Image (cartoon, helix red, strand yellow):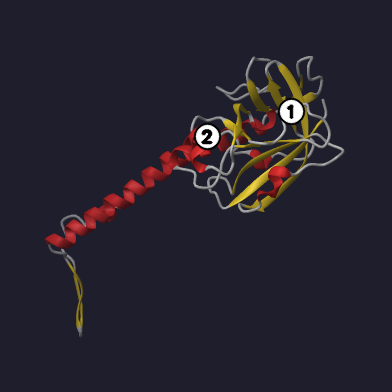
Amino acid sequence: MILDIFRVTPRSRRVKLTKRNGVLFSNPGPLGKISFYFGTFLFCLSIFYAVYLYYPLGSAVLTYWRYKNTPEVVVNIPKATPTEVKLPGVVPTGVAPTLPTKTDEYSITIPKIMATANIVENVSPYSAKEYLKVLENNVVAQAKDTSDVDKGNGHTTYIFAHSTQQGYSVVRNNSVFYLLGELKNSDVVYINRFGTIYTYQVYNQKIVNASQTEYLKYSEPDKELLILQTCWPIGTDWKRLLVFAKRVK
């Protein structure tokens, strides 16, 4: 039976294998049984912990793929952003198209990956104590000393979700940017800043080392940029995925 893997010996059987030079295996004594069951407990605990930790990631990926594989229709974005976006016409149960909404908050919306979150301003990307406290609330952060939106060409707004030294709560709770890797050139990103919606279009993606912080000061003279950062591969903090988008509206 499959449950025999959780028993020291198969049910109702005794095992003893021998060879010329001695015993290969025999039923363990009391101490051996305790060690076996303790090890089995730790194994099961690690499985449950992994499921608990990465459930939001798995849920986000499965929902995205269900959403992605439905028929497409063109949906008109509100007047402030006259761009048209292709969204599935048949939406899975419990999933609604993610479109930008005018509110009095500072937020980001990415329709393709159904991501939306409030943005917390002036967060130091160099202070783990500061950004981990912010990111545990399932929001994203605008890096301190980077430009606000609507500052014109040569300015860059830098927004990040995951960072080094992230705790388990951040891995579990901050799932906003898990699917950034699905963004391709021409996909759109919206920033709602206190009632005004700004439209950005993706034009480049890069995977960089965690130590390459020079992109916090990156700019291009002929573009107003938005850079989105998450850890890569998803669920780890080994490298950084950067998505570059230019302001188009």
Residue 53 or 237: which is nearer the viewer?
A: 237
Does residue 62 show up?
A: yes
Q: Are marks 1 and 2 in contact (CB under 8 Å)?
A: no
Q: Label 1's element?
A: loop
Residue 192 or 32: which is nearer the viewer?
A: 192
Q: Position of residue 172 (x, y in %)?
A: 47, 37
Is the residue 232 above or below the residue 86 in the image? below
- The image quarter containing residue 119 is top right
Nearer the N terminus, badge 1 or badge 2?
2
- Crowdedness near tag 2: few (<14), some (14–19) or many (≥20) residues, C-alpha within 10 Å: many
Quarter of the image that includes the C terminus: top right
Q: Position of residue 15 (x, y in %)?
A: 18, 66
- Crowdedness near tag 1: few (<14), some (14–19) or many (≥20) residues, C-alpha within 10 Å: some
In the image, what residue occupies the spot 66% across and 33% down?
68
Q: Position of residue 160 (x, y in %)?
A: 62, 38
**Residue occupied by mark 1:** 149
- Count numbered badges in the picture: 2
Does residue 3 show up?
A: no
In the image, what residue occupies the spot 78% across and 33% down?
201
Residue 175 or 161: which is nearer the viewer?
A: 161
| Mark nearer the viewer, 1 or 2 | 1
Residue 220 or 64: which is nearer the viewer?
A: 220
Type of the residue with mark 2: Leu
**Residue occupied by mark 2:** 135
Q: Position of residue 33 (x, y in %)?
A: 17, 58
Residue lying farthest front?
Answer: 145
In the image, what residue occupies the spot 30% across and 51% down?
42
Type of the residue with mark 1: Val
Q: Label 2's element?
A: helix
Residue lying farthest right?
Answer: 222
Give left or right: position of 19 versus 138.
left
User: Real-space Cα distance between discs 1 and 2?
Assistant: 21 Å
